[in-house]
Image (cartoon, rainbow, N blue to C red):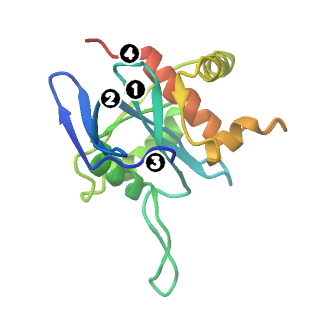
Amino acid sequence: MIFPRPITATFDPETHLTRMIFDGLDKRVSRDFYCMGSVAWPEGMLDGFALSAGQDVKTGQIWIFEEYLFMTVQHWFNDDGSLNRFGLLKFLQDTWNYYRLRTFVWSESEDVHFRYARQVWDNPNIMPQPEFIRTRFAKDTGDNLIAEYLKTQKVMGDVNSQLFRDLKDKDGIERRGVHALRCLLAGYEYMPYGK
């Protein structure tokens, strides 16, 4: 995460914007964001990858607030009952608590999506329930979006994060972080902020 978590975040249902207040160096700074997240569900032995982001309505830049690798939706416990690894549920709750974000885009087969989404919707501890919206794009189109947004600095994030390491890997292996970013950018293209 390159950006600090906001001190407060309030969602305006009329404008669909989240006003976030950050602690600046000498004063508090307020910004309005059009927030969206994305999910690339686990595939085979590859972890799933989720992103939370917000588009600064003044500059149009997309800030990637947080990324999250996960293998399960529910928390994963050891045989003795101790926590082995947090599931996606923690990320979903955190994105609501910190950013008031509950809209996530995805692009997988429907079978894969509904298998995982049903586990989210069936959990009574996740409030409010997230909204999952499918984006459709060809892989080449998604890759072109990533290249365009990076070259024009329309997307910002921690260059030391797993996502940016995934973007640099050119070994021909499909990275879930890259797929999550494709989904996110396609989501902003498909559902742009309108004043």
- Front-most of 70 and 95? 95
Helix, strand or loop for disc 4: loop
In terms of sequence position, does the residue under pointer 3 or pointer 2 come before the other? 2
Q: CA distance from mark 4 to mark 2?
A: 12 Å
In terms of sequence position, does the residue under pointer 4 or pointer 2 come before the other? 2
Q: Residue at x 57, y 42 (%)?
A: 158
The amino acid type, in three-letter code, at marker 4 is: Pro
Crowding near the residue tagged with mark 2, few <14, some 14–19, many ≥20 C-alpha atoms within 10 Å: many
In terms of sequence position, does the residue under pointer 3 or pointer 4 come before the other? 3
Judge left or right: residue 77 versus residue 48. left
Helix, strand or loop for disc 1: strand
Q: Which residue is mark 1?
A: 55
Q: Quadrant of the C terminus?
A: top left
The amino acid type, in three-letter code, at marker 2 is: Phe
Mark whose residue sits in front, 3 or 2: 2
Residue 57 position in % (x across, y down)? 34, 21
Q: CA distance from mark 1 to mark 2?
A: 5 Å
In terms of sequence position, does the residue under pointer 1 or pointer 2 come before the other? 2
Q: Which residue is mark 3?
A: 116
> Pointer 1 and pointer 2: residues touching (CB < 8 Å)?
yes
Residue 153 position in % (x across, y down)? 57, 22
Q: Residue furthest top?
A: 195
Crowding near the residue tagged with mark 3, few <14, some 14–19, many ≥20 C-alpha atoms within 10 Å: some
Label count reads 4
- Front-most of 137 and 25? 25
Helix, strand or loop for disc 2: strand
Identify whether 85 is placed above or below 50. Answer: below
Residue 149 position in % (x across, y down)? 58, 20
Q: CA distance from mark 3 to mark 2?
A: 28 Å
Identify whether 21 is placed above or below 57. Answer: below
Q: Residue at x 37, y 49 (%)?
A: 5
